[in-house]
Image (cartoon, rainbow, N blue to C red):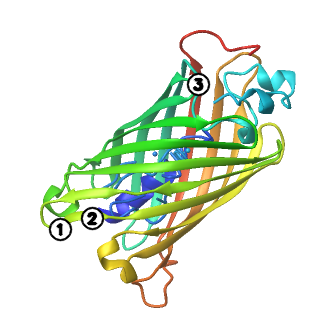
Amino acid sequence: MRAFTLVLATGLALTTGHASAEPTPLPPPTPPPPGTIPPDPSPTTQPTPPPGSHPSSHPGSHPSPVPAPAAPAQATVAPEVASSVVPVRLVLRPLTLPLGVLRGDLLLSYQHGNQALWGAAVSAGYGVTDDFELDATFLPLLLSPVFEYGNPTVSGTYRFIRGGALEVGGFLGLTLYTHDTRANGALTITPGLPLLVRFGDSARLDSGVFIPVTFAADRGTILGAFAPLRFTFQASDPLYLGIGTGLGVADFSHFGDTIYAPLNGFVGYAIAPGCSPLIDLRATLGFPDLYVSGVRGGTETNNWQAILSGSIYLPVVSSRCGR
């Protein structure tokens, strides 16, 4: 089940910044799945990394587990870009979804390792205010080699520094385990501090620190940490590409044997004709645990994953065109 966790944690972990249903981001595990970077938030036996992304913006499949920009950023957006539900340019999207915007995500994943694993996840996010977002992965599924329901997640992100070149927030996530709860734990609580740095309207850096705390009857309390790092370059208004990595510790009680670092590359395309809802399509390819301190040689290149994800942004409260 650990490998199954990595697939979707990386995909949803970095949804922070709302690039798509990917990970995330950030996407940290329980041990944090090596490979989550927002939001990244996944059918997993471990938590989905933060919005961030998701990335959710939900560590690695999330593997991250992360949004209209603040006024200064919007001023640089072309009129046709600003008229969509959220900015078409990913680098201009804020840390949290705008007020009244609903995001729906669909993620499909394949992981190659000791065995081939196919997974899927359905998740959603909602902007309660311009600075407060709620997210949930309510349908995490392992499709093959067996079919089973994974571990659902819920999370919230509050942005307390907004606009301009820097945005910072607070994150709190909860993962409920549905299998082997005595060994894996009944639940994981993940507080975190996601941050976003913009370089004009051409690039952005998503990072932060997340601390998963897992409660397991057979193993006691497991404390970990993950610091995702994802750089995104805006090639054109709809097209973006980037690279994600990070550094984590799955279990501080076994610090020397549980250090890990993921590595992945991604490309995405946004579709937003006129005032229609915005649609994001994204593909990710990478290694959820490229480096693991407990593996001979320190690298694990046999374990790789591919993720296809899509997100749709819908205005629920009222139309945001022209804002």
Q: Residue at x 40, y 57 (%)?
A: 211
Q: Residue at x 57, y 38 (%)?
A: 310
- Callout 1 crowding tier (Cα within 10 Å): few <14, some 14–19, many ≥20: few
- Residue 116, given in percent of the width and then of the height, sits at 40, 65
Q: In this view, does 9 lie above or below 300?
A: above
Q: What kind of residue is marked 3?
A: Asp
Q: What kind of residue is marked 2?
A: Ile
* Quadrant where the N terminus is found in the figure: bottom left
- Residue 131, given in percent of the width and then of the height, sits at 56, 29
Judged from the image, the secondary structure of the residue bearing numbered disc 2 is: strand
Q: Distance between the residues labelled 2 and 1?
A: 7 Å
Judged from the image, the secondary structure of the residue bearing numbered disc 3 is: loop
What residue would you read off at disc 3? 130
* N-terminal-most mark, 3 or 2: 3
Along the viewing direction, whichever of 298 and 323 lies nearer the viewer: 323
- Callout 3 crowding tier (Cα within 10 Å): few <14, some 14–19, many ≥20: many
Most distant residue in the bottom direction? 297
What residue would you read off at disc 1? 219
Evaluate whether residue 63 shows in this view.
no
